[in-house]
Amino acid sequence: MSYQKNERSGELFALGHAALYASLPLFIVLSNGLLPPLFFAGASFLIAGIFLLPVALLSERKKFIPNRAGIIPFAIGAGLIVLVYYPLVIFAGQKTSAGNIAILGQAEVLFSFLLFGLLGSELVTKRRLFGSLLILVGASAILVRNFSGDIVIWDTLIVLAAAIAPFANLFQKIALRHIGAISMVVWRNIVAGAILCLLSLKFEPISLDSITKMQIGLIGLNAILVFGIAKWWLYVAYKKIGVAKSIAINGTSPAITLLLAFLFLKDVPTFVQLFGLIVISFGVYSIMMRQTTTFVGEVVPGDKIGTELGFPTINVKTDKKISQGVYAAHAKVGEKTFPAVMHVGQRPTLKSKEFRIELHVLERLEQEIPETVEVEIVQHLRAVKKFRSIAKLQEQIAKDVKSAKEILQTN
C-alpha cells in the first residue's frame, strides 16, 4: 500500500509539473511587445534560481557545488539549455502561437530518442520507430499549414530548439553525477540569468527604471511557476516514479496549453493544431511506453566468469527473441521475485561471440536455483559494447547495478 501511495503521489507531482509548465507558452506570447526576449528569459531564470536556492541548500547540501570533474559538462549543458534553447524558444515563441510552441516542442522526445538510440542507451524498436514517424507527421502538418506565411520560420526555430535540447540533457546527465539535481538548476539559472540580463541591457532597448508592475508580475509568475515550482515538482516525480514515466505524463502539457490559451487568450485551437496534437501524442506514447517483455527461461550451465568478476549470474535460454543489450529486470526464482540486471548478447570484452542471456540477481539467493526462471524486462540500460579491460567492464557492471536499483525500486 505504501508503494501505491508513493506512486500516486509521484504521478500527481508529474501532472502538476505538466500543468505549470504548460503555462510557459502563454507567458511567452503575453511577453510579446511588453518585454524583450533576452531580458524576459534572464530575469525569469535569475528569480527562479533565487527561489530554489533554499530548497537546494536544505536538500542537497553535500552536492550543492559541483566538483572539478562536473564543471565542464555542467557548463556545456547549462550553456546549451539556458543560453541557447530557452532564448531561442522565447524569441521564436513571441512570433507564433502558444499552441504551436507546446505541440512542436514535443519533437524533443523524438530527437532525444534518436540521439540516445545512436548512443546505445535507448532501445530502438519498430514501435518506437513508428512513434518517431508519428511525431514527424504531426509536426510537419503544422509547419506545412503555415508554409505560406512568415510564421513557419518561427515554428521551424521551435523545432530546432527541440533538436538542441537532447544534447544539453546529455551533458546535464553527466554533470548530475557530480552535483545535485535541484542545485544544478539553481546554479545554471542564477549564472545564465545574470549573463542574459547583462546582454539584454547592452543589446535590447530596455530601461530598468521604466519596468511596470505588469511586467514584473509577468516575469515573477513565469519564474516561480514555470522555472521554480514546476522544476522542483519534476525532480520529486523523477525520484518517486522515474524519468520515463514522468516524461510520458508531461506529454499532457500541450493539451493543457491549448486549454489555457483558449481560456485566457481566446485562442481557439485550429484543426491542424488538434490533428498535430493527437498524432504527436500517439507518437510520444509509442516512444515513452514502458518496454516490458516477460519470458520463461530454462536455466543452463555457465562458465563461472561472472562469479570471477564479482557479479555471479544465472544463465538462461529461451525461444523468445530478445534484442541485444543490458536491461533492468525482475527475476522470479522459485516463489520469490528479485531485482536483477540482465545481459543479452555476445561478450566482446571476453572475446566470446556466443549469444547468451545472463541474469545477475541484486539480492542474495539463499535457495536452490530451479530448472526455469521467469523474467520480466523492465527497462533497457545500454547497448552491449567492448571495453578496453576487464577492470573497465567491472566498473561498468557496477554502474549498471546502481542504475537498475534506482529503476527497480519504483517499478
Image: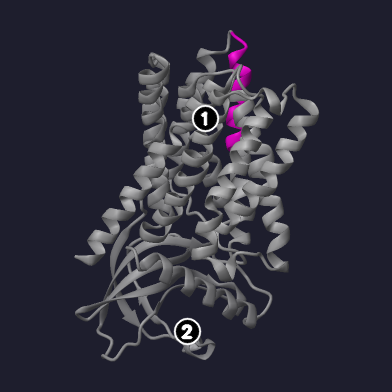
Within 10 Å of disc 1 (Cα), the crowding (few <14, some 14-19, many 20+) is few
* Quarter holding residue 241: bottom left
Q: Earlier in the sequence, mark 1 or mark 2?
A: 1
What residue sits right under mark 2 in the picture?
311
- Give the camera-side residue of 180 and 298: 180
Q: Are marks 1 and 2 in contact (CB under 8 Å)?
A: no
Residue 359 magenta-highlighted: no
Within 10 Å of disc 2 (Cα), the crowding (few <14, some 14-19, many 20+) is some
Amino acid beneath label 2:
Phe
Q: Position of residue 305 (x, y in %)?
A: 51, 87
Question: On residue 217, which mark appears?
Answer: 1
Quarter that holds the N terminus: bottom left
The kind of secondary structure element at disc 1 is: helix
In the displayed orientation, state which residue is furthest to the top.
148
- Give the camera-side residue of 112 and 254: 254
* Residue at 53%, 28% in the rendered image: 218
Amino acid beneath label 1:
Gly
Position of 74 compared to 277: left or right? right
Quarter that holds the C terminus: bottom left
Q: Position of residue 128 (x, y in %)?
A: 43, 44
* Residue at 32%, 59% in the rendered image: 293
Mark 1 and mark 2: span between their CA atoms?
A: 56 Å
In the displayed orientation, state which residue is furthest to the right.
202
Give the magenta part as a residue range: 149-162
